[in-house]
Protein backbone atom coordinates (compact mmCIF):
# COMPACT_ATOMS: atom_id res chain seq x y z
CA UNK A 1 0.00 0.00 0.00
CA UNK A 2 1.41 3.44 -0.93
CA UNK A 3 1.16 6.23 1.63
CA UNK A 4 -1.19 9.12 0.81
CA UNK A 5 0.20 12.28 -0.77
CA UNK A 6 -1.73 14.55 1.62
CA UNK A 7 -2.57 14.23 5.28
CA UNK A 8 -5.76 16.22 4.67
CA UNK A 9 -7.71 17.17 1.55
CA UNK A 10 -10.23 19.95 2.18
CA UNK A 11 -13.18 20.26 -0.19
CA UNK A 12 -14.41 23.84 -0.58
CA UNK A 13 -12.59 27.16 -0.61
CA UNK A 14 -15.22 29.18 1.25
CA UNK A 15 -14.33 30.83 4.53
CA UNK A 16 -14.72 27.55 6.42
CA UNK A 17 -12.51 25.47 4.11
CA UNK A 18 -10.00 28.33 3.94
CA UNK A 19 -9.80 28.58 7.73
CA UNK A 20 -9.43 24.78 8.00
CA UNK A 21 -6.62 24.82 5.40
CA UNK A 22 -4.78 27.57 7.28
CA UNK A 23 -5.14 25.80 10.61
CA UNK A 24 -4.24 22.32 9.33
CA UNK A 25 -1.15 23.61 7.52
CA UNK A 26 -0.10 25.64 10.58
CA UNK A 27 -0.17 22.33 12.45
CA UNK A 28 2.39 20.93 10.00
CA UNK A 29 -0.07 18.70 8.15
CA UNK A 30 0.31 18.19 4.39
CA UNK A 31 -2.79 19.92 3.05
CA UNK A 32 -4.61 20.27 -0.26
CA UNK A 33 -7.66 22.50 -0.66
CA UNK A 34 -9.92 21.99 -3.66
CA UNK A 35 -12.32 24.70 -4.81
CA UNK A 36 -14.67 24.12 -7.74
CA UNK A 37 -15.09 27.77 -8.72
CA UNK A 38 -13.33 30.62 -6.95
CA UNK A 39 -12.01 31.13 -3.42
CA UNK A 40 -14.72 32.71 -1.26
CA UNK A 41 -17.22 32.74 -4.13
CA UNK A 42 -20.05 30.71 -2.51
CA UNK A 43 -22.06 31.75 0.56
CA UNK A 44 -18.90 33.53 1.69
CA UNK A 45 -19.27 36.10 -1.08
CA UNK A 46 -22.99 36.44 -0.45
CA UNK A 47 -22.84 37.00 3.33
CA UNK A 48 -22.71 40.16 5.41
CA UNK A 49 -19.44 39.55 7.24
CA UNK A 50 -20.78 40.42 10.66
CA UNK A 51 -18.52 38.88 13.33
CA UNK A 52 -20.95 38.57 16.17
CA UNK A 53 -21.60 36.75 19.42
CA UNK A 54 -24.98 35.04 19.56
CA UNK A 55 -26.87 33.52 22.46
CA UNK A 56 -29.36 31.15 20.93
CA UNK A 57 -27.84 28.33 22.99
CA UNK A 58 -24.80 27.87 25.21
CA UNK A 59 -23.12 25.99 22.37
CA UNK A 60 -23.81 28.75 19.87
CA UNK A 61 -22.49 31.32 22.32
CA UNK A 62 -19.35 29.27 23.05
CA UNK A 63 -18.44 28.89 19.37
CA UNK A 64 -19.24 32.48 18.37
CA UNK A 65 -17.38 33.95 21.34
CA UNK A 66 -14.37 31.67 20.87
CA UNK A 67 -14.27 32.58 17.17
CA UNK A 68 -14.72 36.28 17.82
CA UNK A 69 -11.66 36.24 20.05
CA UNK A 70 -9.70 34.40 17.34
CA UNK A 71 -10.67 37.07 14.80
CA UNK A 72 -9.66 39.72 17.28
CA UNK A 73 -6.26 38.05 17.65
CA UNK A 74 -5.85 38.10 13.87
CA UNK A 75 -6.96 41.67 13.22
CA UNK A 76 -3.48 43.23 13.06
CA UNK A 77 -2.43 40.72 10.41
CA UNK A 78 -5.46 41.18 8.16
CA UNK A 79 -4.71 43.11 4.95
CA UNK A 80 -6.69 46.32 4.24
CA UNK A 81 -8.94 44.61 1.68
CA UNK A 82 -10.45 42.49 4.49
CA UNK A 83 -11.91 45.80 5.76
CA UNK A 84 -11.93 44.80 9.42
CA UNK A 85 -14.12 47.35 11.20
CA UNK A 86 -14.71 47.24 14.96
CA UNK A 87 -18.05 49.04 14.58
CA UNK A 88 -19.96 47.05 17.22
CA UNK A 89 -23.59 45.95 17.03
CA UNK A 90 -26.73 47.57 18.37
CA UNK A 91 -29.73 45.30 18.84
CA UNK A 92 -32.67 47.69 18.43
CA UNK A 93 -35.79 47.38 20.59
CA UNK A 94 -39.01 48.72 19.08
CA UNK A 95 -41.26 48.18 22.11
CA UNK A 96 -41.25 47.23 25.80
CA UNK A 97 -41.39 43.52 25.03
CA UNK A 98 -38.21 43.80 22.96
CA UNK A 99 -36.67 45.89 25.72
CA UNK A 100 -37.19 42.94 28.08
CA UNK A 101 -35.25 40.87 25.57
CA UNK A 102 -32.49 43.53 25.69
CA UNK A 103 -32.33 43.04 29.44
CA UNK A 104 -32.23 39.25 29.11
CA UNK A 105 -29.43 39.48 26.56
CA UNK A 106 -27.58 41.99 28.73
CA UNK A 107 -27.64 39.58 31.67
CA UNK A 108 -26.62 36.59 29.51
CA UNK A 109 -23.68 38.37 27.89
CA UNK A 110 -22.39 40.26 30.90
CA UNK A 111 -22.44 37.09 33.02
CA UNK A 112 -20.16 35.55 30.37
CA UNK A 113 -17.71 38.43 30.13
CA UNK A 114 -18.97 40.14 26.95
CA UNK A 115 -18.88 43.95 27.06
CA UNK A 116 -22.50 45.08 26.62
CA UNK A 117 -24.38 48.27 27.36
CA UNK A 118 -28.12 48.91 27.61
CA UNK A 119 -29.18 52.04 25.69
CA UNK A 120 -32.36 53.94 26.53
CA UNK A 121 -34.28 55.78 23.82
CA UNK A 122 -32.17 58.92 24.17
CA UNK A 123 -28.79 57.16 24.06
CA UNK A 124 -29.97 55.04 21.12
CA UNK A 125 -30.80 58.25 19.24
CA UNK A 126 -27.38 59.69 20.11
CA UNK A 127 -25.63 56.50 19.01
CA UNK A 128 -27.53 56.31 15.70
CA UNK A 129 -29.22 59.60 14.78
CA UNK A 130 -30.71 58.19 11.55
CA UNK A 131 -33.01 55.79 13.43
CA UNK A 132 -36.69 56.80 13.50
CA UNK A 133 -38.11 58.42 16.64
CA UNK A 134 -40.17 56.27 19.00
CA UNK A 135 -37.80 53.33 19.41
CA UNK A 136 -37.47 52.21 23.01
CA UNK A 137 -33.76 51.43 23.31
CA UNK A 138 -31.18 48.81 22.47
CA UNK A 139 -28.20 46.74 23.44
CA UNK A 140 -24.73 47.73 22.27
CA UNK A 141 -22.26 44.85 21.84
CA UNK A 142 -18.99 46.72 21.50
CA UNK A 143 -16.70 43.86 20.49
CA UNK A 144 -18.72 42.77 17.46
CA UNK A 145 -17.10 43.73 14.18
CA UNK A 146 -17.37 43.47 10.41
CA UNK A 147 -15.12 42.10 7.66
CA UNK A 148 -15.32 41.63 3.90
CA UNK A 149 -15.57 37.83 3.74
CA UNK A 150 -14.26 36.88 0.25
CA UNK A 151 -10.99 38.71 0.90
CA UNK A 152 -10.76 37.10 4.35
CA UNK A 153 -11.12 33.67 2.69
CA UNK A 154 -8.41 34.57 0.18
CA UNK A 155 -6.15 35.76 3.01
CA UNK A 156 -6.58 32.43 4.82
CA UNK A 157 -5.92 30.42 1.66
CA UNK A 158 -2.80 32.48 0.95
CA UNK A 159 -1.68 31.82 4.51
CA UNK A 160 -2.26 28.09 4.01
CA UNK A 161 -0.30 28.20 0.75
CA UNK A 162 2.55 29.98 2.54
CA UNK A 163 2.56 27.14 5.05
CA UNK A 164 2.94 24.55 2.30
CA UNK A 165 -0.68 23.77 1.31
CA UNK A 166 -1.50 22.96 -2.32
CA UNK A 167 -4.41 24.98 -3.66
CA UNK A 168 -6.54 23.62 -6.51
CA UNK A 169 -8.93 26.25 -7.89
CA UNK A 170 -11.40 25.48 -10.67
CA UNK A 171 -11.29 21.77 -9.79
CA UNK A 172 -14.48 20.14 -8.57
CA UNK A 173 -14.52 17.04 -6.40
CA UNK A 174 -16.66 14.40 -8.05
CA UNK A 175 -16.54 11.85 -5.28
CA UNK A 176 -15.07 11.12 -1.88
CA UNK A 177 -13.35 7.74 -2.11
CA UNK A 178 -12.09 5.52 0.72
CA UNK A 179 -8.58 6.92 0.30
CA UNK A 180 -9.04 10.47 -0.95
CA UNK A 181 -11.07 12.33 -3.55
CA UNK A 182 -11.69 11.90 -7.25
CA UNK A 183 -11.91 15.16 -9.19
CA UNK A 184 -14.30 15.74 -12.07
CA UNK A 185 -11.33 15.76 -14.48
CA UNK A 186 -10.64 12.16 -13.44
CA UNK A 187 -7.54 12.82 -11.35
CA UNK A 188 -7.24 11.52 -7.81
CA UNK A 189 -5.84 13.14 -4.66
CA UNK A 190 -4.93 10.56 -2.06
CA UNK A 191 -5.29 11.63 1.55
CA UNK A 192 -5.26 10.31 5.07
CA UNK A 193 -8.30 12.45 5.89
CA UNK A 194 -10.89 14.30 3.83
CA UNK A 195 -12.77 17.36 5.09
CA UNK A 196 -16.11 18.17 3.47
CA UNK A 197 -16.33 21.96 3.79
CA UNK A 198 -18.51 22.46 0.73
CA UNK A 199 -21.17 24.50 2.55
CA UNK A 200 -24.64 24.12 1.06
CA UNK A 201 -23.18 21.70 -1.51
CA UNK A 202 -21.83 19.37 1.20
CA UNK A 203 -24.80 16.92 1.01
CA UNK A 204 -24.02 16.31 -2.68
CA UNK A 205 -20.75 14.69 -1.61
CA UNK A 206 -21.88 13.18 1.69
CA UNK A 207 -25.34 11.78 1.26
CA UNK A 208 -27.64 11.73 4.23
CA UNK A 209 -26.28 14.66 6.22
CA UNK A 210 -29.09 16.91 7.37
CA UNK A 211 -27.97 20.18 5.79
CA UNK A 212 -30.60 22.21 3.95
CA UNK A 213 -30.37 25.45 2.02
CA UNK A 214 -31.73 28.68 3.39
CA UNK A 215 -31.82 31.47 0.84
CA UNK A 216 -31.03 35.06 1.80
CA UNK A 217 -31.18 38.43 0.00
CA UNK A 218 -28.92 41.47 0.46
CA UNK A 219 -28.79 44.96 -1.06
CA UNK A 220 -25.84 47.33 -1.18
CA UNK A 221 -26.14 51.10 -1.52
CA UNK A 222 -23.92 53.78 -2.93
CA UNK A 223 -21.47 55.51 -0.52
CA UNK A 224 -23.00 57.41 2.41
CA UNK A 225 -20.19 57.46 4.98
CA UNK A 226 -21.99 59.55 7.62
CA UNK A 227 -25.29 57.65 7.65
CA UNK A 228 -24.51 54.84 10.12
CA UNK A 229 -21.94 53.93 12.79
CA UNK A 230 -22.88 50.45 14.06
CA UNK A 231 -24.27 47.26 12.61
CA UNK A 232 -27.94 47.54 13.53
CA UNK A 233 -30.18 44.53 13.97
CA UNK A 234 -33.80 44.53 15.08
CA UNK A 235 -34.60 42.18 17.93
CA UNK A 236 -37.28 40.73 15.70
CA UNK A 237 -34.35 39.30 13.68
CA UNK A 238 -34.11 36.54 16.24
CA UNK A 239 -37.65 35.46 15.38
CA UNK A 240 -36.70 35.42 11.70
CA UNK A 241 -33.50 33.46 12.29
CA UNK A 242 -35.40 30.90 14.38
CA UNK A 243 -38.18 30.28 11.89
CA UNK A 244 -37.47 26.89 10.38
CA UNK A 245 -40.20 27.04 7.76
CA UNK A 246 -41.61 29.46 5.20
CA UNK A 247 -39.97 32.84 4.71
CA UNK A 248 -39.15 35.83 6.85
CA UNK A 249 -37.46 39.23 6.65
CA UNK A 250 -35.84 41.30 9.38
CA UNK A 251 -34.04 44.63 9.60
CA UNK A 252 -30.27 44.19 9.63
CA UNK A 253 -27.92 46.85 8.25
CA UNK A 254 -24.19 47.28 8.18
CA UNK A 255 -21.90 50.25 7.51
CA UNK A 256 -19.04 49.18 5.22
CA UNK A 257 -15.55 50.63 5.31
CA UNK A 258 -16.24 51.93 1.79
CA UNK A 259 -19.07 54.11 3.14
CA UNK A 260 -21.66 51.81 1.57
CA UNK A 261 -24.55 50.32 3.50
CA UNK A 262 -25.28 46.61 3.29
CA UNK A 263 -28.95 45.92 3.92
CA UNK A 264 -30.38 42.54 4.90
CA UNK A 265 -31.86 40.19 5.37
CA UNK A 266 -34.30 37.48 4.43
CA UNK A 267 -34.64 33.76 5.05
CA UNK A 268 -36.40 31.26 2.78
CA UNK A 269 -36.23 27.55 3.36
CA UNK A 270 -35.46 25.10 0.56
CA UNK A 271 -35.81 27.59 -2.30
CA UNK A 272 -33.34 26.51 -4.96
CA UNK A 273 -33.51 29.37 -7.50
CA UNK A 274 -30.84 31.97 -6.94
CA UNK A 275 -32.78 34.74 -8.68
CA UNK A 276 -33.69 37.87 -6.71
CA UNK A 277 -37.30 37.67 -5.57
CA UNK A 278 -38.64 41.20 -5.93
CA UNK A 279 -41.47 40.73 -3.44
CA UNK A 280 -39.02 39.54 -0.74
CA UNK A 281 -36.66 42.37 -1.63
CA UNK A 282 -39.44 44.95 -1.30
CA UNK A 283 -40.52 43.54 2.07
CA UNK A 284 -36.91 43.61 3.28
CA UNK A 285 -36.33 47.20 2.16
CA UNK A 286 -39.67 48.40 3.57
CA UNK A 287 -38.70 46.89 6.90
CA UNK A 288 -35.35 48.67 6.82
CA UNK A 289 -37.02 51.99 5.92
CA UNK A 290 -39.40 51.58 8.89
CA UNK A 291 -36.33 51.79 11.14
CA UNK A 292 -34.24 54.19 9.04
CA UNK A 293 -36.64 56.46 7.09
CA UNK A 294 -33.71 58.29 5.44
CA UNK A 295 -32.81 55.11 3.56
CA UNK A 296 -35.69 55.76 1.18
CA UNK A 297 -33.73 58.65 -0.35
CA UNK A 298 -30.49 56.68 -0.91
CA UNK A 299 -29.49 54.84 -4.07
CA UNK A 300 -28.96 51.12 -4.08
CA UNK A 301 -26.40 49.64 -6.46
CA UNK A 302 -27.01 45.91 -6.44
CA UNK A 303 -29.10 43.15 -4.90
CA UNK A 304 -28.10 39.49 -4.71
CA UNK A 305 -28.89 36.22 -3.01
CA UNK A 306 -26.94 33.48 -1.28
CA UNK A 307 -27.57 30.16 0.39
CA UNK A 308 -26.91 29.40 4.04
CA UNK A 309 -26.30 25.75 4.93
CA UNK A 310 -28.70 25.02 7.78
CA UNK A 311 -28.88 22.11 10.23
CA UNK A 312 -32.01 21.32 12.30
CA UNK A 313 -30.45 22.44 15.61
CA UNK A 314 -28.76 25.53 14.13
CA UNK A 315 -25.28 24.35 15.04
CA UNK A 316 -22.60 23.37 12.52
CA UNK A 317 -21.30 19.85 11.95
CA UNK A 318 -17.63 19.75 12.96
CA UNK A 319 -15.95 16.37 13.30
CA UNK A 320 -15.79 12.84 11.97
CA UNK A 321 -18.58 11.48 9.82
CA UNK A 322 -20.40 8.64 11.49
CA UNK A 323 -20.69 6.66 8.30
CA UNK A 324 -17.50 7.19 6.39
CA UNK A 325 -14.11 6.43 7.90
CA UNK A 326 -11.50 9.16 7.31
CA UNK A 327 -14.14 11.75 6.44
CA UNK A 328 -14.58 14.87 8.58
CA UNK A 329 -17.39 17.39 8.17
CA UNK A 330 -17.04 21.16 8.56
CA UNK A 331 -20.37 22.40 7.30
CA UNK A 332 -23.86 23.60 8.27
CA UNK A 333 -22.86 27.05 9.60
CA UNK A 334 -26.13 28.75 8.54
CA UNK A 335 -25.93 32.51 9.11
CA UNK A 336 -22.83 32.49 11.29
CA UNK A 337 -20.15 30.80 9.19
CA UNK A 338 -18.03 33.90 8.69
CA UNK A 339 -17.89 34.40 12.45
CA UNK A 340 -17.44 30.75 13.37
CA UNK A 341 -14.99 29.72 10.63
CA UNK A 342 -11.92 30.26 12.81
CA UNK A 343 -13.35 28.39 15.79
CA UNK A 344 -14.44 25.58 13.46
CA UNK A 345 -10.91 25.23 12.11
CA UNK A 346 -9.44 25.04 15.63
CA UNK A 347 -11.98 22.41 16.73
CA UNK A 348 -11.34 20.38 13.58
CA UNK A 349 -7.58 20.32 14.05
CA UNK A 350 -7.90 19.56 17.77
CA UNK A 351 -9.82 16.42 16.82
CA UNK A 352 -7.38 15.45 14.06
CA UNK A 353 -4.33 15.71 16.33
CA UNK A 354 -6.23 14.42 19.37
CA UNK A 355 -5.81 17.55 21.49
CA UNK A 356 -8.24 18.82 24.12
CA UNK A 357 -10.27 21.66 22.56
CA UNK A 358 -10.65 25.05 24.28
CA UNK A 359 -14.47 24.72 24.26
CA UNK A 360 -16.49 21.47 24.56
CA UNK A 361 -16.74 19.83 21.15
CA UNK A 362 -19.77 17.58 21.74
CA UNK A 363 -22.54 20.00 20.60
CA UNK A 364 -20.99 20.20 17.11
CA UNK A 365 -20.12 16.56 16.49
CA UNK A 366 -21.94 15.02 13.50
CA UNK A 367 -22.65 12.03 15.77
CA UNK A 368 -25.36 14.05 17.53
CA UNK A 369 -27.42 13.90 14.31
CA UNK A 370 -26.83 10.21 13.85
CA UNK A 371 -28.14 9.66 17.37
CA UNK A 372 -31.37 11.33 16.32
CA UNK A 373 -31.38 9.35 13.12
CA UNK A 374 -30.60 12.31 10.87
CA UNK A 375 -27.46 11.02 9.25
CA UNK A 376 -28.77 8.25 7.05
CA UNK A 377 -26.77 5.31 5.89
CA UNK A 378 -24.26 6.23 3.24
CA UNK A 379 -25.15 4.43 0.05
C1 LIG B 1 -27.49 36.60 3.07
C2 LIG B 1 -26.47 36.01 3.99
C3 LIG B 1 -25.95 36.78 5.02
C4 LIG B 1 -24.99 36.24 5.88
N1 LIG B 1 -24.44 37.03 6.86
C5 LIG B 1 -23.50 36.51 7.70
C6 LIG B 1 -22.89 37.32 8.69
O1 LIG B 1 -23.15 38.52 8.76
N2 LIG B 1 -22.01 36.75 9.55
C7 LIG B 1 -21.69 35.43 9.48
O2 LIG B 1 -20.92 34.95 10.32
N3 LIG B 1 -22.22 34.63 8.51
C8 LIG B 1 -23.11 35.14 7.63
N4 LIG B 1 -23.68 34.37 6.67
C9 LIG B 1 -23.33 32.95 6.63
C10 LIG B 1 -22.02 32.72 5.95
O3 LIG B 1 -21.97 33.44 4.73
C11 LIG B 1 -21.83 31.22 5.70
O4 LIG B 1 -22.13 30.49 6.88
C12 LIG B 1 -20.39 30.92 5.30
O5 LIG B 1 -20.01 31.71 4.19
C13 LIG B 1 -20.25 29.45 4.97
O6 LIG B 1 -18.95 29.26 4.47
P1 LIG B 1 -18.58 27.88 3.81
O7 LIG B 1 -17.13 27.94 3.53
O8 LIG B 1 -19.10 26.77 4.67
O9 LIG B 1 -19.46 27.79 2.49
P2 LIG B 1 -19.25 28.50 1.07
O10 LIG B 1 -18.74 29.88 1.20
O11 LIG B 1 -20.53 28.32 0.33
O12 LIG B 1 -18.10 27.65 0.44
C14 LIG B 1 -18.28 26.35 -0.05
C15 LIG B 1 -17.38 26.23 -1.26
O13 LIG B 1 -17.37 24.86 -1.70
C16 LIG B 1 -17.22 24.89 -3.09
N5 LIG B 1 -17.67 23.58 -3.59
C17 LIG B 1 -18.93 23.10 -3.65
N6 LIG B 1 -18.95 21.87 -4.17
C18 LIG B 1 -17.66 21.56 -4.46
C19 LIG B 1 -17.03 20.43 -5.03
N7 LIG B 1 -17.73 19.35 -5.43
N8 LIG B 1 -15.67 20.45 -5.19
C20 LIG B 1 -14.95 21.53 -4.80
N9 LIG B 1 -15.51 22.64 -4.27
C21 LIG B 1 -16.84 22.64 -4.09
C22 LIG B 1 -18.10 26.03 -3.55
O14 LIG B 1 -17.73 26.49 -4.84
C23 LIG B 1 -17.83 27.06 -2.45
O15 LIG B 1 -16.83 28.00 -2.78
C24 LIG B 1 -24.60 34.88 5.75
C25 LIG B 1 -25.10 34.12 4.71
C26 LIG B 1 -26.01 34.68 3.81
C27 LIG B 1 -26.52 33.84 2.68
Image (tube, rainbow, N blue to C red):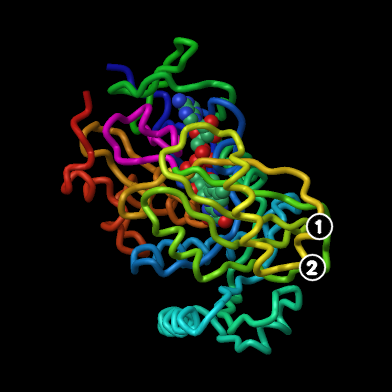
Task: Indicate which label's residue lies in the foreground, 1 or 2.
Answer: 1
- In terms of image quadrants, where is residue 358? bottom left
Q: Is residue 261 covered in magenta?
A: no
- In terms of image quadrants, where is residue 163? top right
Please say if 263 is above or below 186.
below
Can residue 112 be seen? no
SS at mark 2 in the image? loop
Q: Quick check: marks 1 and 2 in contact, CB under 8 Å?
A: yes
Circle on res. 298? 1
**Quadrant assignment for the C terminus:** top left
Residue 83's spot in the image, x, y percent? Answer: 72, 56
SS at mark 1 in the image? loop
**Quadrant assignment for the N terminus:** top left
Q: Is 178 on the left or on the right of 302, as rendered?
A: left
Residue 237's spot in the image, x, y percent? Answer: 50, 64
Q: Looking at the image, which residue is at 64% across and 45% down?
A: 155
Going from N to C along the chain, the mark reached first, 1 or 2, is 2
Residue 265's spot in the image, x, y percent? Answer: 57, 54
Can residue 72 be seen? yes
- Crowdedness of circle 2 by 10 Å Cα count: few (<14), some, many (20+)? some
Q: Is 41 on the left or on the right of 19, as rendered?
A: right
Span colored in magenta: 194-213
Amino acid sequence: MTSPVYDVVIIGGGIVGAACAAECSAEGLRVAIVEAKMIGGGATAAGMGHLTVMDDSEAQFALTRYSQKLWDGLRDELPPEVEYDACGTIWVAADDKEMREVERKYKFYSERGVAVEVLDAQSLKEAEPSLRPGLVGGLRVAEDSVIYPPCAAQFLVDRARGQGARVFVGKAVQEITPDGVRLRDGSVLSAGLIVNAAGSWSPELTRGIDVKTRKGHLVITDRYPQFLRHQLVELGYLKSAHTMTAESVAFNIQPRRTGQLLIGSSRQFEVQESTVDVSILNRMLSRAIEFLPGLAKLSSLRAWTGFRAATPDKLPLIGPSVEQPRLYLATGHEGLGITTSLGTAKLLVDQIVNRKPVIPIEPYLPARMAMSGAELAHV
